[in-house]
Image: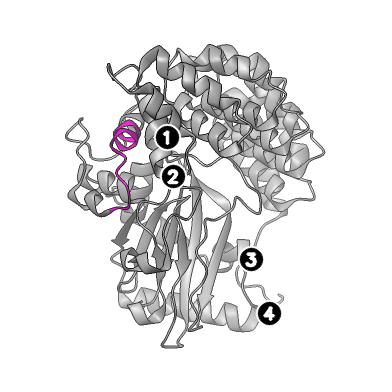
Amino acid sequence: MGQEPVLLTDEQMQEFITRGYLVLKTDFSPDFHEKLMGKLNHVYNEEGNPGNNLLPRVPELQTVFNHPAIDGALQSVIGPNYLMHTHRHGHFNATPKPGGWHKDSYWGYSRMRNHHPWWAMIMYFPQDTPVELGPTGVMPGTQNYETRIFKEDNLKEEALASGEAGTFILIHYDIWHRATANTLGEPRYMLKFEFMRTEAPTAPSWNNENPNWITPTSAKQLFYQHDDMWEETWNWLSGKVGSIAETKQESDIEQLSATLIGDNEPEAINAAYQLASSGDEGLVVLEEVLYSEQLKDSRLAAYGLSIAGEKAVPILEKALESNQAYTIAHAGFALGELRQLASSAIPKLTRLVNHPSSYVRTTIIDAISMIQEPADEAVAGLIQALKSEDVQTRFSAGLALCRFGAEANAAVPQLTKALEDEDRYVRGHAVEALNYINTDAAKDVLIEYLLASRWCPTTNPSSTF
């Protein structure tokens, strides 16, 4: 029996919601990390970067991800039944030049980014990592911005994942980050693993003592304040859908409308949330902007509609009939966030899984997996997506099926075919889906596949048998 996970506190969750990251630490012995570094050095020197095979090539890392501090942090943020994604990567840095600021793509593809934590990353440092060794840097509070709002003279705000061996940083998947300069020139490893929520929250999954949102003092240091968004995210993580809908009685709708389509993204986000909480008048503005020819404005309107409760559903269903691809995608995104409130949209959504736009297809597939009801119809739509000629559509469908459990048993035959797909992520997601479906039929296919593809961690070019 493993140790009990160390769940995050209310204060830590409030820090994560506002700042987008937490720096935490495991308590492995120096000897453990010395051996882990020895294995990493051997693999990198003799074979190169193992890429997605990092975990089977260095199986000691599974001990790291079983650690109660890491497991507890992940359970707190993305739920107890989270998925470790097929993509993982060991980053080696020995250069004095800092890396560029960026948000990670989704395995080379773009997709609608989410204010709610459906995805997270762990970056683990197996060696002592002082500032001079080039730890990962993150820009606090930027997880919800498409644009890079900060300038070079703001870098004093940068937070560094610096610390002793065993330090790790848990980040919202979409935060702006970079590798900092390694001025020592000594080997620095950062082991990056990605994780996905497979269940929408129905109750707090952290060590929750106070049900009410409290803005942490540290949030006052961020570039912008987002009190409505932060509180709504806290409520969402507590299992509440549309919690701020119709909570504001008096709003300057005209001013909010102008701000929503303005050039200041953080202020526009605040306007979207305030409009979502302003009742029918706010919904009228959000609906109009959803059809905007400016993609950024339409996307921001979708964020507002995604938290506006059941009154937003008919507005969004109507938008699925638009001739503008990204309006359809943004409407689908918002319906997905409304979850069971949007079950009436499933027939329309499933008809869109073969839409000509990949942006639409991927977003619609995610939405179907978040709404889930009626399950038979939702799963049938995802089975169709698994048959697509487009790689991104196929691997998105496989990943989406992980959220259904045994209700996706009808997808097992098509997932079996997906195990022979030419794309690594289609195969990987099929494996994960079969694991989460977990019926006898799924387990039989999965065991046969894993036995045939068994990995031997000690086999390498210099030791083949």
Q: Earlier in the sequence, mark 4 or mark 1?
A: 1
Q: At numbered mark 2, what does the secondary structure look like: helix, strand or loop?
A: loop
Q: At numbered mark 3, what does the secondary structure look like: helix, strand or loop?
A: loop
Query: Which residue is found at the position 44% from the left and 27% from the top?
Result: 257
Point out the stretch of residues depicted in magenta: 222-234
Alpha-carbon span between mark 1 and mark 3: 57 Å
- Magenta residue check for 150: no
Left/right of residue 151 with respect to residue 88 in the rendered view: left
> Of tags 2 and 3, which is closer to the observer?
2
Alpha-carbon span between mark 2 and mark 3: 53 Å
Residue type at tag 4: Ser
Where residue 398 appears, as percent x and y from the top left, is 66, 37
The residue where tag 2 is placed is 264
Query: Which residue is found at the position 22% from the left and 34% from the top?
Result: 213
The residue where tag 4 is placed is 463
What secondary structure is the stretch in magenta mostly built from? helix
Alpha-carbon span between mark 2 and mark 1: 8 Å
Where residue 259 appears, as percent x and y from the top left, is 42, 34
Q: Are marks 1 and 3 in contact (CB under 8 Å)?
A: no
- Magenta residue check for 223: yes
Residue lying at the far right in this picture: please name it.
389
